[in-house]
Image (tube, rainbow, N blue to C red):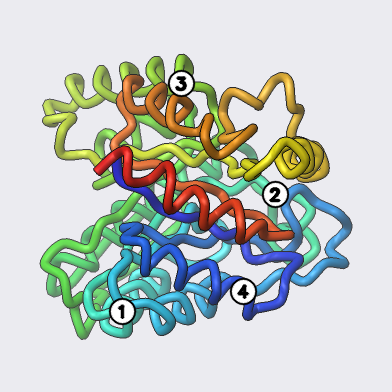
Amino acid sequence: MNFGIHTGQQNAPYQDFVKAWKMADAAGFNWISVWDHFYEAPDRGGDGPTYETVAMMTAAAAATTRARIGVLVMSAGYRPPALLAKMIATLDHISNGRANLGIGAGWHQAEYEAYGYTFPSLKARMDMLEESVQIIQSMLANDTTTFEGAHYRVREAKLYPKPVQAKLPVWVGGGGEKRTIPIAAKHADGWNIAYVPPEVYRRKIAVLDQWCEKFNRDPQTIMRSINTGFYLGTDKKSAARGLQQMAQDGFNVERTGPGMLRGLVSEAVEQIRAFERAGATQMNIAFRPPFDFEAFQAFIEEAVPRFR
């Protein structure tokens, strides 16, 4: 099991994110990611500080030396795919070949409308996602790209400089079994889903494998990961505070609890093992403000070494 840290860049000073990134990088985590929101998630009216995504990815690259820098996930509706390909290729140079791109269909209607974006139907958003992934993959790999879709068009589009790494991984995020997972199986290098219990994750992996078979693709060529919330404590008092924070973050503790790391740090190992048995090869802990750096350090020292 590899470990990553997923830092939703809201409701904390910028310096706290830098501290979290550096702790993860020094501990040998192989992934650092942010999310793509203009407002808080869950929505709290947009009054809390929320930092821009590409700038924060660049900052994470500058603050670290080893971990891969990603995003889970970019909304396909916010940036034209050709521009997004240009952004991620540039980040690959800034990070010396550590960039990953995660992309999804988008869902946060309030911020779409507040920032002047049309919020399309689910079908349209899924179509936009599939077109985006195809354009981005082509532009990262080929000298020129021409694509004529229902939503996006590029003509003899060039992307230079190419990424530092020979293959910059493009991830698709989401658990939809009729569109999202098939798009991942057909076009992506990695797939991610968030906040589901191990038994659901196992079933989603089986669906991914089935779609790979339909597309005549080796399922082992798709990296797969799980995002799980980090609500651990070093003692009973801080563990209880973690459960309170889970509820404040908009999660139903009883329903979504099995998809989270919760309780004492000492109890996290078996929770991680359950995801490992379900087929996850990477766990990205969603570290949300207010950050419990003491619990995170304990997790680094006590839980992570058990999987190396």
**Sequence-earlier tag: 4 or 1:** 4
Spot occupied by residue 142 in the image (x, y as percentages of width and height): 14, 68
Q: Residue furthest front?
A: 235
How many C-alpha atoms fall within 10 Å of the one at disc 3: few (<14), some, or many (≥20)? many
In this view of the protein, can residue 52 be seen by the observer? yes
What secondary structure is marked by label 4? Answer: loop
Mark 4 is on which residue type?
A: Glu
What secondary structure is marked by label 1? Answer: loop
What secondary structure is marked by label 3? Answer: helix
Task: Return the mark for residue 95.
Answer: 1
Q: Nearer the viewer, residue 259 or 188?
A: 259
Q: Nearer the viewer, residue 62 or 106?
A: 62
**Residue with the mark numbered 2:** 108
**Residue with the mark numbered 3:** 198
How far apart, in angstroms, are the residues tagged by discs 2 and 1?
Answer: 29 Å
Classify residue 224 by image quadrant: top left
Depth check, mark 4 against mark 2: the one in front is: 4
Residue at (43%, 63%) from the top-left corner? 24
How many C-alpha atoms fall within 10 Å of the one at disc 2: few (<14), some, or many (≥20)? some
How far apart, in angstroms, are the residues tagged by discs 4 and 2?
Answer: 15 Å
How far apart, in angstroms, are the residues tagged by discs 4 and 3?
Answer: 32 Å
Classify residue 61 by image quadrant: bottom left
**Residue with the mark numbered 4:** 52
